[in-house]
Image (cartoon, rainbow, N blue to C red):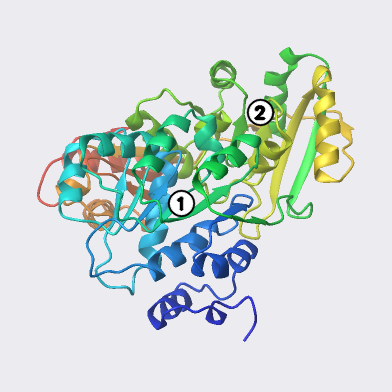
Amino acid sequence: MSASSFSSLPLSEAMLANLDSLDYKEMTQIQAESLPQILRGEDIIAQAKTGSGKTAAFGIALLEKLNVRFFGVQALVLCPTRELADQVAKELRRLARLTHNVKILTLCGGVSIGPQIGSLERGAHIVVGTPGRIVDHIRKGTLQLGTINQLVLDEADRMLDMGFADDIDTVLAACNENRQTLLFSATYPDNIKKISARCQKNPQMIEVETIHDQQQIEQHFYELRESDETHPAVLTLLAHFHPVSSIAFCNTKQGCDDLLNYLRDEGVSALALHGDMEQKERDQVLVRFSNKSCSVLIATDVAARGIDIKGLDAVINVDLARDSEVHVHRIGRTGRAGESGLALNLVVQKEVHKINRLEDYMGQSINLEALPHGDKKSLPSPNMVTLNIDGGKKDKLRPGDIIGALTKDAGLPFEKIGKIDMFDFAAYVAVDSSIARAALKQLSDGKLKGRKFRARKL
């Protein structure tokens, strides 16, 4: 039995069987270093890069310590964004498949609080949520945290960046003092040390490799004279490398909007993501980007937090990150799960000092290059189109109903249908642009589950 095998841990037969069925054979580094300590009941501060397997690290431990016969909240996971909370809850449910009667509840803003109150009244074992909405429930008296045994602060650095410090303090004050507290953070600034001092007892520090493998992520740094050259430079890089999907990072919301307008004027399929968007609008942007019906997502670090896009071809740093750790976190979104990735960085002359810091942090020399040639006639263009249906899970709609309507009823080819995203009151289906008109006609004129629903192209 290898030391990195899950079977080397004191886990239940049901958990080991489920991990095996999920093809979790060997622990990742963060799992191997943190799980034994978490299972022993110790507080930890874990610093690990994105995609390191941290959700399974704390998720396995939460489920192992659960008393399913007691229908009170025993574990709380705080996340900075609704997207991350949804991902964490989804992973916990996968890990809990063979553990009977586990109820995992997601409590986030952007949706009505009434149904959440109803769900809490029926009881829950684990709650995953965002700080603002968790505080709303604490103040209403609908969420009691005196019974929790474990508290997880996931991506704690970004929660503090987003201004949630007071909300976190409110949550800590409502929690059982004898709990175990697990703090996960991609970076380790001073404010993380301060919050740890307030809420943890003798925490064990775990730091796994945060620098990405140079062979996995190909990085280029392009020198520009003035900042007004950045927008044309982004266009040149898109034309040269032709990534199917890429995230472009700007340091400000205004920078995102300016780049969005420029790229759209040049005929690029681009969307922007920023913190003051309505939740429905934010959902639609992420759906369109993840289902490959949009080529470029433009975002700030705070807005992009919690997004996990599979198969991301490139990260473009339009503005260099203000912090070297944040730079590494950004580029870690590409080249995941063993795939190769591309990180393209624009360096205006006045920002060359950041390169010196990056070299020290990454332990490698950085060569500044001239921009490559790119023909604007070969800009990336998405093949998929997103169709929005005004009905979702609460209407008892399922992905199979949509596939059946398009393939069986309309006779459209199955392989031309892409990702389907289901929400409570909306559904989104990506279809190849060649069948978009026929698919929209079927969804608008036909029926799903014997009912008519409005449909439109986004």
Disc 2 target residue: 377
Q: How crowded is mark 2: few (under 14 residues within 10 Å), some or many (20 or more)?
A: few
Asked if residue 230 shows in the view, the reply is: yes
CA distance separating discs 2 and 1: 49 Å
**Tag 2 secondary structure:** helix
Disc 1 target residue: 152
Q: How crowded is mark 1: few (under 14 residues within 10 Å), some or many (20 or more)?
A: many
Q: Quadrant of residue 130?
A: top left
Q: Which residue is drawn at 12% across and 41% down?
A: 452
Q: Which residue is drawn at 50% across and 29% down?
A: 162
The picture places residue 317, in percent across and down from the top left corner, at 68, 31
Asked if residue 242 shows in the view, the reply is: no
Q: Identify residue type, mark 1.
A: Val
Q: Residue at x 51, y 69 (%)?
A: 40
| Lateral position of residue 363 relative to residue 413, left or right | right
Chain-order first, disc 2 or disc 1: 1
Q: In this view, does 436 lie above or below 281?
A: below
**Tag 1 secondary structure:** strand
From the image, which quarter does the N terminus lie in? bottom right
